Image (cartoon, rainbow, N blue to C red):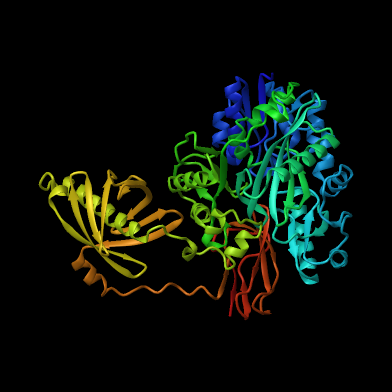
Amino acid sequence: MFKKILIANRGEIACRVIKTCRRLGIRTVAVYSDADRDALHARMADEKVHVGAAPSAASYLVMERIIEACKQTGAEAVHPGYGFLSENAAFCEALEAAGIAFIGPAPHAITRMGDKITSKRLAQEAGVNTVPGHTGVIADADHAARVAAEIGYPVMLKASAGGGGKGMRIAWDAAECRDGFERASSEARSSFGDDRVFVEKYIEEPRHIEIQVLADTQGHCLYLGERECSIQRRHQKVIEEAPSPFLDPATRQAMGEQAVALARAVDYRSAGTVEFIVDKERNFYFLEMNTRLQVEHPVTELITGLDLVELMIRVAAGEALPLTQDEVELTGWAMETRVYAEDPFRDFMPSIGRLVRYLQPPESPHVRVDTGVNEGGEVSMFYDPMIAKLVTWGKDRSEAIGQMQEALDRYHIRGVDHNISFLNALMAHPRFQAGRLSTNFIAEEYPEGFRPADVPREDPAHAIVVAALAHRRYMDRAACISGQVAGYERQVHDDWTVIVEGVTHHLHVRPQADGYTVLYDDREFAVSCNWRLGQPLFKAEIDGKPICFQVERDGIRYRLFHRGAEIDALVLAPDVCRLHGLMPEKAPPDLSRFLLSPMPGLLVKVSVSEGQEVKAGEELAVVEAMKMENVLRAQQDGVVSKIVADAGASLSVDQAIMEFA
């Protein structure tokens, strides 16, 4: 077994590997960039080495600096995590030449499976089902359109290198194919340094289901069940679960056996994932093989009881797998949500900044949090905006979903925008709960984007009651501080008015020995709670049912978060409410004549010039954020009167790019 391992990564995966190494008694070395000098992974490791400037191309992707860090610290092996150099065969070869073990597959397996064109050919030779398509490299946009016409629309344009949804576009006609080729090749060049793109048939009503494989150097290879990863946005996974609610035992076995056959065909070792696309008839087709640990590996760990990081380390050290295929057992159900720094109400634009408050749900046998940040840490524009992976386990799918909903309610993040409301809304969606999934789920269910009105509310009355009680508890505290009669909170019966979205709600609050009785809307609620001002989580029981709201107070205004819903409530005494109705409303400023950047990022291209007439839908600019290109288009006809920002500029949220006459 190794004595010291360097983790050539950052964030939650680096922290995850460090935790496993601690349990195994292995010392760890973290590498960090300028932006990660105070990052959690750098503070958790036994040693740390600075490897360069903030951009990954100047730090985490510079293999010479990683190898030098190994030599400097005496690290015997490198765990690459995922992303960065994890699927770089040249890095693997350089480590071997330096006498340092790579905790992953051999270079030849990375090379063959890392190229989507080559891997598809190898899959066909190994007897693995493949999607119809053109496996040759596409020369240009016109070539892409000709090939797509031969295959038949719709088609998928995919970068040959890389993954993570970058360099992928769906095209339904020749125009979309040409534009998609340009975008896919540009993103691939920017993200992977390889702009090759190929075309294959797009499977309609598809499900994305993948098989976890594990192999050692003694010739043993097995599969650890499947993961359903169909809930995706822009080809990036949002929710993963294991097992799949769609597969039957026969299909699971067939997919697993084909995944093992492919792994054997390239003499694979370590953990890897074979991804399939599955149609509504359970026909499955090979997509690609990821020759590394997957982001979603925790759901497999929870249902198998195995630590995949530990097994990767043991395999790299020359040990045999400790179990056979017959000994693999799948127990219960696991669910994972990816918590991102992004604004779901603004087309999921990435958010950067400091985590002013960060309170994650407590871990338990049912809840696991893999995170690489803590309170006071910063989400940088240089890296992926993932804050954490929240994973839950239950004896069945329904329980796993319920555990996830409870955990999301208790995840308190402030300082950056985040997608917790969206995740909780997905958990509550009837179609998701029924398991009727496809990779088109989000596009079909939220065709106009995610809006506050899309968030279901279990019982809207609960938010009204909690707002009134939060203010009542605040008044109790204020009375105590001001020296009013002891026991004030038990003597006063009071009325309150709660205004939500312009609608007025009247409540009567009556203190009881064990809580409160609240009369509202011809209903009576029995509430017990011990919430105090300043606590972010309002934990209580309403009519005997536990609930948890996140509560923020600003004067007499309260913002409440529960089950994905965000509710703004104004709490007033009845006489004050009458006066409030006389207050004029301030009109928001008119920004329609500006093109504003919806996200922080790099202005890659300005597509128009001053004085130019533009039509609604016409491309105005391209902004790159988190290695994804985002095309900004005109919302209405107009004339460009002034270009405010030039290509190459670093933009902040809502920064003006151009102005219209």
On the image, which quarter does residue 13 sit in?
A: top right
Residue 123 sits in which quadrant?
A: top right
Q: Quadrant of the N terminus?
A: top right
The number of numbered badges drawn on the structure is 0
Q: Is residue 284 visible?
A: yes
In x, y percent, where is residue 434? 56, 55
Position of residue 546 in the picture relative to residue 314 (left or right): left
Residue drawn at x 40%, y 74% as measured from the top left: 587
**Residue 629 higher or lower than 211, as above or below:** below
The percent position of residue 214, horizontal first and vertical second, equals 73, 32
Name the residue nearer the viewer: 532 or 391: 391
Report whether residue 69 is seen. no
Say which quadrant the C terminus sits in. bottom right
Location of residue 385 with respect to 111 vertically, above or below: below
Rendered residue at 21%/63% (across/down): 573
What is the residue that sits farthest to the left in this orientation? 485
Q: Nearer the viewer, residue 355 or 427?
A: 427
Q: Is residue 220 above or below residue 635?
A: above
Image coordinates of residue 467 in percent, x first then y, are 31, 56
Query: Viewer-proximal residue, 299 or 627?
Result: 299
Q: Position of residue 230 (x, y in %)?
A: 65, 52
